Image: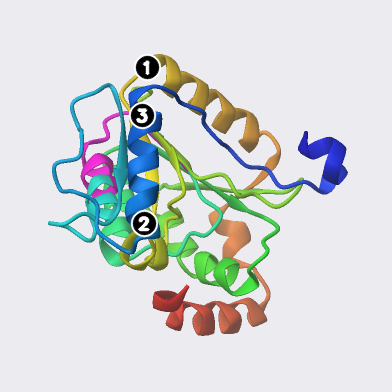
């Protein structure tokens, strides 16, 4: 396993394994990507667990719309893990509005990152999120690369999409989206375990950060559309 190969410096990631029809659909979507084509717009969306690409024949922002709509419908909890958090305006607003509705919104991001500018850009968004009650955690043990979301303990997703411009608007991505409450429970439990190994960022701590943070955050935020 990764611990045997890389020791304690291995990355923290989350993967899923599926079979049957989902595996068949994944193979078809891989072929579509490999050939540089767009996925068919009538992809299967009737199952409890489905595969959603971000680029179909009738929409080049499928995952973006899915995330924003789901965040807007959250009622109790919204737990998001992403290694690269550089949200566009709609995504950031959906998270903030959820917190303002008294949804328990928690964000887990890396304390150590393989892309420094992406971490600076993420931190540029902290203040506005913290101000409305979003709780932010930075994972400390090793590089965090997991991409998961669980909403209200009933809707969850694991996939390749980061919460950034490139994943939501440029890259070809594929996420497993599920309404299986057992699966959601596993994703949520892993999230809660991970934040036990993370530092929570408080507003008071964030307001007292060193002045040079403001400079690097500002420069990185200006480049956010290319991250």
Q: Are marks 2 and 1 in contact (CB under 8 Å)?
A: no
Query: Front-most of 178 and 142?
Result: 178
Query: Which residue is farthest top?
Result: 182
Element under disc 3: helix
Q: Residue at x 20, y 39 (%)?
A: 43
Is residue 16 toward the left or the right of residue 60 in the image?
right
In the image, the segment drawn in magenta is 67-80
Residue 180 image point, x, y percent: 35, 19
Report, in whole angstroms, how far the alpha carbon at label 2 lies from the one at label 1.
30 Å
Residue at image x 40%, y 31%? 23
Question: Looking at the image, is mark 2 or mark 1 nearer the viewer?
Answer: 2
- Residue to which mark 2 is pinned: 33
Report if the CB atoms under discs 1 and 3 are less than 8 Å apart: no
Around disc 2, counting alpha carbons within 10 Å, would you say few (fewer than 14), some (14 to 19), or many (20 or more)?
some
Residue 71 is one of the magenta-drawn residues: yes
Q: Is residue 193 above or below residue 227?
A: above
Pair 1/3: label in front: 3
Give neighbour class at mark 1: few <14, some 14-19, many 20+ (Cα, 10 Å). some
* Quarter holding residue 113: bottom right
Residue 76, image x and y in percent? Answer: 32, 28
Precedes in sequence: disc 1 or disc 3: 3
Q: Which residue is mark 1?
A: 181
Percent x, y for residue 213?
63, 76
* Residue shown at the point (63%, 29%) measured from the top left: 193
**Which residue corresponds to mark 3?**
22
Q: CA distance from mark 2 to mark 3?
A: 16 Å
Taking 53 as reference, is 46 above or below it? above
Q: Is residue 223 magenta?
A: no
Residue 114 appears in the picture as rendered: yes
């Amino acid at each position: 396993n990764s611990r045997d190969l890389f020791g304690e410096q291995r990355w923290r990631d989350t993967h899923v394994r599926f079979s049957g029809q989902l595996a068949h659909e994944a193979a078809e979507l891989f072929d579509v990507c490999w050939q540089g084509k767009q996925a068919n717009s009538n992809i299967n969306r009737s199952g409890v667990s489905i595969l959603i690409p971000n680029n179909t024949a009738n929409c080049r922002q499928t995952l973006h719309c899915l995330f924003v709509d789901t965040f807007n419908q959250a009622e109790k909890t919204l737990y998001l893990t992403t290694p690269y958090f550089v949200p566009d305006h709609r995504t950031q607003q959906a998270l903030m509005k959820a917190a303002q509705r008294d949804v328990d919104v928690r964000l887990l991001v890396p304390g150590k990152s393989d892309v420094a500018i992406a971490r600076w850009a993420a931190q540029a968004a902290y203040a506005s999120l913290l101000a409305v009650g979003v709780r932010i955690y930075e994972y400390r043990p090793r590089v965090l690369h997991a991409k998961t979301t669980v909403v209200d303990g009933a809707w969850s997703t694991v996939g390749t999409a980061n919460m950034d411009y490139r994943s939501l608007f440029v890259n070809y991505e594929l996420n497993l989206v599920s309404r299986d409450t057992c699966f959601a429970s596993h994703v949520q439990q892993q999230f809660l375990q991970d934040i036990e190994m993370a530092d929570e960022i408080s507003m008071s701590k964030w307001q007292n950060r060193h002045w040079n943070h403001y400079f690097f955050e500002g420069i990185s935020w200006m480049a956010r559309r290319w991250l």
